[in-house]
Image: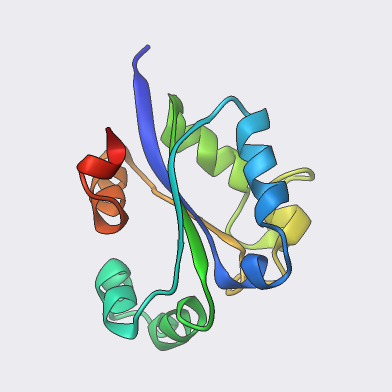
C-alpha cells in the first residue's frame, strides 16, 4: 500500500486551551509522519474560501467566525491510508458521538467547537494541503 497525505488542522479552541502538544503526540503515536507544520491566523476571506463547500449551510457564518477567532496549526500528515486513519483518530464530528480516546472525545466541547479538522478524501486532501503549503514547503 502506498503512502498517502492528508491535512490536519488544530482549530482555535484546542490551540487556546493548550492542546497542541497532546494532539501532535497523538498524531505521532498513530504512526503519522508530520511532513510540515505551521501556526497561522486565518483571514475571513481565506476561511470563506477554504470552507466554500459549506457556504450555503446555515452554520457557515459561525464556522468562519470560529476559525478566525484565534490561531490554528495546520499540518501535513503522511502514512498508509492517511485520510481514513486521521478521521478515525479524530473521532466523530460531534464529540458526544466520538469513541473514547479519540481527539474529539478528549478535547472537543461541541459539534461546532470540535478542535480538529481532517480532509474527507485523498482528492480533497491534495486541495486542502495546497491551500496552506507551497510545493517548496513539502519537499
Q: Is residue 83 visible?
A: yes
Is 122 located above or below residue 52 in the figure?
above
Is 79 located above or below residue 120 in the figure?
above
Q: Which residue sits at x=39%, y=74%? A: 42
Q: Which residue sits at x=29%, y=67%? A: 50
Is 50 located above or below residue 121 in the figure?
below
Q: Position of residue 97 (x, y in %)?
A: 70, 56
Quadrant of res 135: top left
Is 90 located above or below residue 97 in the figure?
above
Quadrant of res 115: bottom right
For the N terminus, the image quarter is: top left
The foreground one among 45 and 60 is 45
43 relative to 18 in the view: left or right: left
114 relative to 128 in the view: left or right: right
Q: Is residue 98 visible?
A: no
29 relative to 65 in the view: left or right: right
For the C terminus, the image quarter is: top left
Q: Position of residue 27 (x, y in %)?
A: 61, 38
Number of callouts: 0
The foreground one among 43 and 83 is 43
How was the colour assigned to the protein in this rendering? Answer: rainbow
Q: Which residue sits at x=51%, y=66%? A: 72
Q: Residue furthest top?
A: 1
Q: Position of residue 88 (x, y in %)?
A: 58, 39
Amino acid at each position: 500500500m502506498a503512502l498517502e497525505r492528508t491535512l490536519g488542522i488544530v482549530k482555535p479552541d484546542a490551540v487556546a486551551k493548550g492542546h497542541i502538544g497532546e494532539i501532535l503526540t497523538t498524531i505521532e503515536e498513530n504512526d503519522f509522519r508530520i511532513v510540515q507544520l505551521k501556526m497561522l491566523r486565518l483571514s475571513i476571506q481565506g476561511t470563506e474560501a477554504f470552507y466554500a463547500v459549506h457556504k450555503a449551510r446555515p452554520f457557515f457564518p459561525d464556522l468562519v467566525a470560529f476559525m478566525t477567532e484565534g490561531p490554528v496549526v495546520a499540518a501535513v500528515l503522511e502514512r498508509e491510508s492517511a485520510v481514513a486513519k486521521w478521521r478515525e483518530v479524530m473521532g466523530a464530528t460531534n464529540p458526544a458521538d466520538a469513541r473514547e480516546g479519540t481527539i474529539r472525545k478528549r478535547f472537543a466541547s461541541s459539534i461546532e467547537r470540535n478542535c480538529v479538522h481532517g480532509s474527507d478524501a485523498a482528492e480533497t486532501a491534495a486541495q486542502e494541503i495546497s491551500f496552506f503549503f507551497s510545493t517548496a514547503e513539502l519537499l
